[in-house]
């Protein structure tokens, strides 16, 4: 009987940022048991070589499984438990519930428009976070999920459809209590999306008051900021203030300077991050593309050099097409065309390549895909983010060495989100592993053909079980809902 896996002769990039080391890695159960040379001759007592599956990793890097810190995979873990779009990139943990939208706790009966970003089947939402975590666990996903509670979701619970206003004191109380219960049941933090209509009218005070339980439970605060364009510096101050008042670590989501008139402004935002990081715990995530993607919004059209439609509920066969072309065919302006396509999603080309690179290379940066799992013609980041950072930005452009690229998608991410015993190849850590070819790893998903697994990702294991191998999903379904209380217990042990 096979009781352990021995990854032999690979180059271990352990996630810490240290230089690669040639070594074997022994996996036993869901943990990493040992690291070192010639382990086949030095097996732990009670384990014989006949019980070990030996995997030749010559020429390959053995790294920790990647942590996608910015996702909208809340219910994708349930609907699509093999999680091929992430496992194929080497991702073994996804942080869900970003940008203010989470699938729990959702105490209403109707899903409404906003949650369609992350929910395809209404039965996948849950009235409490505990119930939702149970649904994820029951679906046996291939990879792990950790979950933030969305401020916009809380608003929809407490305020009904009347969201274009500040919450009243009793409504703030309801939201704070829902967050408190959710953290108690295992959520790891709060996310807000003050940029989006359901939360735009919320004041700084509203969010800071709701966020109070974060300090008590050790939760993090992630923010899709109110403004990533002209007023970005003000929005950074607002975000940092909310974190300070709640006593919570801050993560700014998908940091960007949006719109042509703001190109180059990383020269202002990055030093501001550096300064603020000396005062409080702050970090940010970045995806490696000059285009963003979200719902189709008229206000965003002027900011973008080009707009591609990712889905539309009303007009068929427009997914993947340029809005300008669609408007020409309709014989109307792009604004009128946008109206006719609603509800719809879009990709916006609105960033400067140099800005994206300097953000990614900043000491505070980690990698998150922000992929949207249910789009008909998704942004290529859904399938391409991590291999693109490794192959394009690290190997080809030499933006940072391989071990630093890996660090920004593993140990650093685990530390910032308090994901205990994940993100490093180290004895005692969980056996989340990505084995890849450093010479060939690269994304193949493009804006034209976005659903395409990366090249060079050889084998991916999550909690010791194979979830991706030879270009196909594996049989491993040992992913877990990573709950705050378990993570904290393990951190103390
Ligand atoms: Zn966002
Ligand atoms: Cu997002």
Image (cartoon, grey):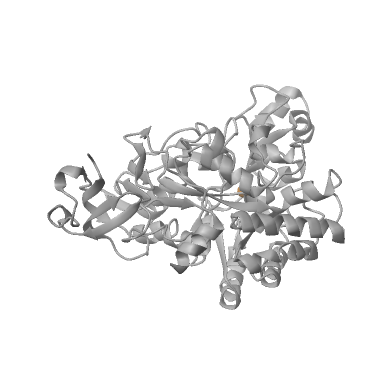
Quadrant of the rendered structure where residue 183 is? bottom right
- Look at the picture and state if 186 lies above or below 50: below
Q: Is residue 423 visible?
A: yes
Judge by depth and name the residue closer to the eye, 279 or 187.
187
Q: Can residue 73 be seen in this view?
A: no
- Look at the picture and state if 219 lies above or below 385: below
Instruction: Give the quarter of the figure containing the N terminus.
Output: top left
| Residue at figure coordinates x 77%, y 52% from the top left | 199
Residue 261: % across, % down:
68, 56
Judge by depth and name the residue closer to the eye, 198 or 46.
46
| Residue at figure coordinates x 74%, y 29% from the top left | 341
| Left-right relation of 102 to 143 | right
- Look at the picture and state if 466 lies above or below 32: above
Most extreme residue toward the left, as rendered?
A: 41
Residue 469: % across, % down:
33, 37
Give the tally of numbered discs: 0
Residue 144: % across, % down:
48, 47
| Left-right relation of 314 to 351 | right
Most extreme residue toward the bottom, as rendered?
A: 279
Instruction: Give the quarter of the figure containing the C terminus.
Output: bottom left
| Residue at figure coordinates x 28%, y 60% from the top left | 20
Residue 116: % across, % down:
68, 36
């Amino acid at each position: 009987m096979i009781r352990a896996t021995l990854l032999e002769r690979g180059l271990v990039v352990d996630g810490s940022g240290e230089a690669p080391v040639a070594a074997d890695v022994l996996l036993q159960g869901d943990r990493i048991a040992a690291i070192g040379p010639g382990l086949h001759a030095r097996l732990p007592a009670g384990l014989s070589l006949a019980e070990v599956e030996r995997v030749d990793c010559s020429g390959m890097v053995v790294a920790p499984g990647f942590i996608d810190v910015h996702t909208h995979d809340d219910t994708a873990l349930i609907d699509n438990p093999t999680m091929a779009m992430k496992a194929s990139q080497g991702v073994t943990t996804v942080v869900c519930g970003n940008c203010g939208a989470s699938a729990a706790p959702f105490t209403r009966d109707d899903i409404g428009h906003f949650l369609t970003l992350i929910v395809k089947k209404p039965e996948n939402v849950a009235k409490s976070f505990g119930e939702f975590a149970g649904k994820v666990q029951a679906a046996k996903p291939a990879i792990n999920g950790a979950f933030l509670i969305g401020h916009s979701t809380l608003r929809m619970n407490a305020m009904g459809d009347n969201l274009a206003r500040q919450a009243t004191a009793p409504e703030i109380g309801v939201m704070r209590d829902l967050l408190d219960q959710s953290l108690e049941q295992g959520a790891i933090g709060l996310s807000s999306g003050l940029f989006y209509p359901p939360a735009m009218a919320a004041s700084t005070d509203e969010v800071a008051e709701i966020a109070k339980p974060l300090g008590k439970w050790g939760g993090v605060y992630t923010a899709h900021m109110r403004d990533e364009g002209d007023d970005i510096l003000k929005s950074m101050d607002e975000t940092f203030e909310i974190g300070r008042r709640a006593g919570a670590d801050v993560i700014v989501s998908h940091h960007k300077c949006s719109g042509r008139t703001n190109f180059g402004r990383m020269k202002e935002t990055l030093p501001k991050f550096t300064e603020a990081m000396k005062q409080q715990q702050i970090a940010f995530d970045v995806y490696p593309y000059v285009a963003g993607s979200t719902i189709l919004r008229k206000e965003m059209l002027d900011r973008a050099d080009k707009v591609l439609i990712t889905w539309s509920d009303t007009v068929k066969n427009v997914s993947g097409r340029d809005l300008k072309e669609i408007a020409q065919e309709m014989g109307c302006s792009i604004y009128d065309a946008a109206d006719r396509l609603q509800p719809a999603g879009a990709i916006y080309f609105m960033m400067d390549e140099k800005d994206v690179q300097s953000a990614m290379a900043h000491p505070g940066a980690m990698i998150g895909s922000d992929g949207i799992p249910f789009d008909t013609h998704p942004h290529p980041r859904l399938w391409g983010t991590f291999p693109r950072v490794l192959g394009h930005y690290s190997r080809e452009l030499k933006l940072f060495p391989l071990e630093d690229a890996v660090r920004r998608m593993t140990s650093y991410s685990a530390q910032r989100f308090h994901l205990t015993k994940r993100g490093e190849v180290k004895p005692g850590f969980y056996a989340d592993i990505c084995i890849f070819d450093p010479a060939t790893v690269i994304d193949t998903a493009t804006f034209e053909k976005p659903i395409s697994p990366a090249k060079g990702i050889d084998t991916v294991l999550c909690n010791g079980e194979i979830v991706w191998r030879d270009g196909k999903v594996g049989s491993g379904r040992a992913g877990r809902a990573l709950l705050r209380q378990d993570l904290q217990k393990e951190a103390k042990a």
